[in-house]
Amino acid sequence: MKQRIEQLRDRINLLNYKYYVEAQSEVSDYEYDALLRELQELEAQHPEFFDPNSPTQRVGSDLGSGFVSVEHRYPMLSLGNTYSLDELREFVNRVEREEGHTEFVCELKFDGTAISIIYENGKLTRAVTRGDGTRGDDVTANIRTIRTVPLVLRGDNIPPYVEMRGEVIMPHASFQRLNAEREEAGENPFANPRNAAAGTIKLQSSAEVARRGLDCYLYSMVGEGLPHENHWDNLQEARGWGLKISDRMVRCRSWEEIEEFITRTDSERGSLPYDTDGAVVKVNDYATQRRLGSTAKAPRWAVAYKFKAEQALSRLLSVDFQVGRTGAVTPVANLEPVQLAGTVVKRASLHNADQIALLDVRVGDMVYVEKGGEIIPKITGVELSERTDDCVPFEYIARCPECGTPLVRIEGEAKHYCPNSEGCKPQIVGRIIHFISRKAMNIEGIGDETAELLYTSGLVSNIADLYRILPQQIATLPRMGTKSAENIMRQLTESRGVPFSRVLFALGIRFVGETTAKYLANHFRTMDALMAASVEELAEADEVGEKIAESIRAYFADERNVAIINRLREVGLQMEEVEKESLSDVLAGKSIVISGSFVRHSRDELKALIELHGGKNLATVSGTTDYLLAGDKIGPAKLQKATKLGVQIISESEFEEMIGGAEITLPKEPFEKPAPKVEEKIPVQGALF
Ligand code: IVH
């Protein structure tokens, strides 16, 4: 028994680490909760094996490096949860046994990451993650970028100090856009919107956070001197202050009403624009809440009822290994066809070798398939009771299934890679397909199949070869004629006008997605400057960290890539960012130094704006500096020097005023801002759905 307890502790600790530190969830919530519950039960039966460090003894922690850790004035507790309606009913009965007839509030359990937003005298002063429940990370700059979080509250009855607790979520639309970008850049997509929200809130660049389109629902008010003595009225009041409170919330006075809310929410949740993984049932009245009290982890006056993710059980027939454009290998399960959430599923992702080992999946096993917020179904577990003796563990491949090259595993990455980038067919064809795609060079006359044919027929073996094919060569390919050949030739000619940032994106450098390419083009201006940059210099561009910088360096260090770029240059592709026209000369003759991080613009955007208005952007403060444009976390040395030299220090909004209003954005590309979100209609107080 001791062995099982230890095994469970190890497994849960590993899953916690993956979830809280790496923002990856490898098993379903259901499976995680089942493991935790098994451990709790075994520990209760065997108090002799008590361990204060067991994962049952604490709330998981999301404390990460790079943020200031601050203490919560009021602890942020977790919630007890159940998957069983009987247990939920048991909770309601217990409360009523102890407290008599009680009013409950039922609300959605938002599937994101918890946040506490502090308003002092109506102004947002700080936003802190849950962390370990006692201390969390100060992520104020990131939260300030969420458009639905008011920076200033309006209205009456606002206490001088109030904490609004809620959930930062990533709506499906933002999630899909983000993952598409990540896949294009050869990065691992987020497993689900919850991980994406948790990962995003911990980014160091608030400009990137702003771009990703998070949202935030508030579900409780904490503090002293609150306007009302109950949860419901306070949330309605908060809505009046401009805070985003869900209208999917009801007051219930009987078990039947609670059950009805749950059934309805479960059937309607699929059509919501964000994920919800359950319902939360809370005692409404604060005095009753206080009497019921809390355990160390969770209140005794609230409980979460979790919906089961839609799951299906099917037999694992075989495993294929797919090689992507970047050489990353993905194991894909072939299943006996099974109905799941309205579609027939035959294939599902097995993620990587670690996941296969963690789940101990074997060919022949009955496996659970789930469709979460994500598009591709995944295997989340094995039904061990159905395992037969002929289910044997299988070896993860050691060689590329396409070209036979031994696979490599880069430290810190979960996936295996085929290093034979120049000789492995799916990588070569994948790069050609990427190069001609709409957001890159937009040569759509060549479809995926034609791209493959061009390669197999020996006409094209790299992206530069595309510019030397002849119309008559295309016309002889299957399903191609003179018309399509002419069309392709025209698109190839037109692609010479595609801006430099898109050419850069089209090269398919690992981790250089559409946005990163824009930042790089804007920062370095020319291909030559980019190719000459060191890792340190590359990392100075917005949104380029060490990992991306190293990948860019490695790309240019390969002379085969340099040769291709030279050929692309010879055929006339854009290798320089076209200078933008100036917007005004209000900053003519002014030198401005930028330091710190900013809420509405990235540093490169600010730099571009300075130049567009006739000013000069300099790296260091000196006697000739006119302004220091100071953001959050400004370098202390710069600040000290500026003060000493009497340089005027200006904020982001003062800068915006100088150049003519806060709404100023760059004229067109490269910095498209996401479209403003349509505000949800403020519902009638207490309206049901
Ligand atoms: S109340 C003391 N209400 O669920 C009460 N939590 O598993 C604490 N959550 O950490 C939370 N929707 O991040 C509450 N309507 C809701 C919620 C909610 C999502 C999250 C929250 C919490 C976790 C507990």
Image: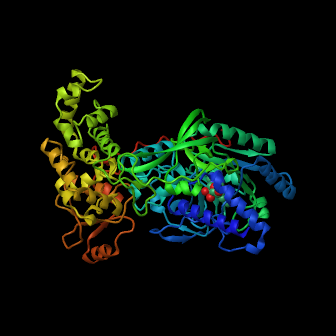
Q: Position of residue 90 (x, y in %)?
A: 82, 52
Left or right of residue 297: residue 132: left
Please report the residue visible at 32 percent of the width from the left and 43 percent of the height from the top. 425
Task: Report the front residue among 583 and 619.
Answer: 619
Query: If the picture is divided into quarters, which one holds ligand 1?
Result: bottom right
Front residue (pair 85, 8): 8
Is 157 situated above or below 258? below
Location of residue 665 with respect to 590 vertically, above or below: above
- Quadrant for the C terminus, please: top right
**Residue 595, percent across and down?**
31, 66
Q: How is the image coloured?
A: rainbow
Q: Nearer the viewer, residue 681 or 312?
A: 312
> In the image, residue 173 lies at what x, y percent?
48, 42
Q: Is residue 364 left or right of residue 85?
A: left
Above or below, 629 relative to 258: below
Q: Residue furthest left?
A: 570
Q: How many numbered circles are shown?
A: 0
Horizontal side, residue 538 vs residue 418: left or right: left
Residue 541 on image: x %, y %: 29, 59
Q: Does residue 135 sit above or below 365 in this rendering?
A: below
Residue 227 makes an appearance in the image:
no
Q: Measuring 28% from the left and 57% from the top, which residue is drawn there?
A: 552
Q: Quadrant of the N terminus?
A: bottom right
Query: Is 468 left or right of 30, judged from the image as shown?
Result: left
Whether residue 131 appears in this view of the structure is yes
